[in-house]
Image (cartoon, grey):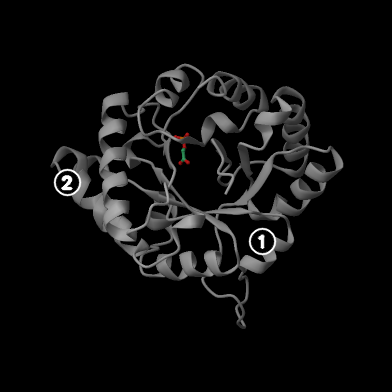
Amino acid sequence: MNFPKLIANWKMNGSSKLVKEWLEEAQDKIPKDYQTKCLFCPPVCYISDASKLISRTDSDLLLGAQDIDAHSSKSLTGGISGSMLSDLGCTFVIIGHSERRINFKEKEIIIEKLKSALSSNINVIYCVGEDSSEKESGNTTKKIIDQLSVLKGLNPKNLMIAYEPIWAIGTGNNASSEYIRDVHSVIKNELENLLSSNTDIPIAYGGSIDTSNVETIVKTQYVDGLLIGGASLKAAEFSEIAKISLNF
Ligand code: PGA
């Protein structure tokens, strides 16, 4: 599987105009052979526009969704299934982001969403991360292991993990290289225990990545990718991050 190295998570930002401008600029500024390593995740209402623009401009950027419904077919007003996302050209979906866990109280439903995505052949970026009180009380490992436990029994081939400490998201306070390396190493070991497979599951880091810290983070041991929120909204900044990270 071709996993992305950079993931642009737009969250609830943007407009049709901004999506168009962003894609045109990113297509122009990100080297062609690196575009296949960059995943664009706009709000769901812009995925169709983005998909058409990506094909029209002959771009190689990957397209992903920020959420998926847990059911594949049901009378479910407002639901969006994996096959619908696939139909629009999405090959990845983000599941378990802390903003959904907190604001939408997502917990038990996460396993259903994982199954729904994998059964529709959509690759999953599964997010885990501790909050500041868990970090301060020395419970980071416990929290991460608990969040990873839902992966037991799933097919690891289509999985990527994103480690996003909640205290680092949108705060300008990214985790240090040593801290990221240690947590990613815990994740790696736990995935081997859980999935008893030789598949090397990529692990991305996310939380206040920008042009000033990307080089240090991307060079960190066990970092296979980057999940970028705020700094992905401007194509110029995201393209600069891409140019820095493609050397590593
Ligand atoms: P941030 O967000 O880069 O703005 O910290 C990352 C994320 O939540 O995906």
Q: Which mark is residue 153?
A: none
Q: Nearer the viewer, residue 82 or 43?
A: 82
Q: Is residue 237 visible?
A: yes
Q: Residue at x 69, y 66 (%)?
A: 84
Which residue is labeled 2 in the image?
A: 139
Residue found at the very far top of the displayed protein:
212
Q: Vertical placement of 43 versus 59: above or below?
A: below
Q: Residue 171: which quarter of the image?
A: top left
Q: Amino acid at mark 1?
A: Leu
Which residue is labeled 1 in the image?
A: 85
- Disc on the earlier residue, 2 or 1: 1
Mark 2 to mark 1 CA distance (whole Å): 36 Å
Q: Residues within 10 Å of mark 1 (few under 14, many from 20)?
A: many
Where residue 108 appears, x then y in whole percent? 36, 69
Give the side of residue 177 with respect to residue 225, left or right: left
Q: Nearer the viewer, residue 44 or 64?
A: 64
Q: Vertical placement of 101 versus 162: above or below?
A: below
Q: Secondary structure at mark 2?
A: loop
Q: Vertical placement of 159 versus 244: above or below?
A: below
Q: Amino acid at mark 2?
A: Asn
Where residue 242 appears, x then y in whole percent? 59, 25
Where residue 233 appears, x then y in whole percent? 61, 33
Give the side of residue 60 with respect to residue 195, left or right: right
Q: Secondary structure at mark 1?
A: helix
Where residue 6 appears, x then y in whole percent? 55, 35
Give the side of residue 170 with respect to residue 230, left or right: left
Q: Vertical placement of 210 versus 100: above or below?
A: above
Q: Residue at x 64, y 24 (%)?
A: 239
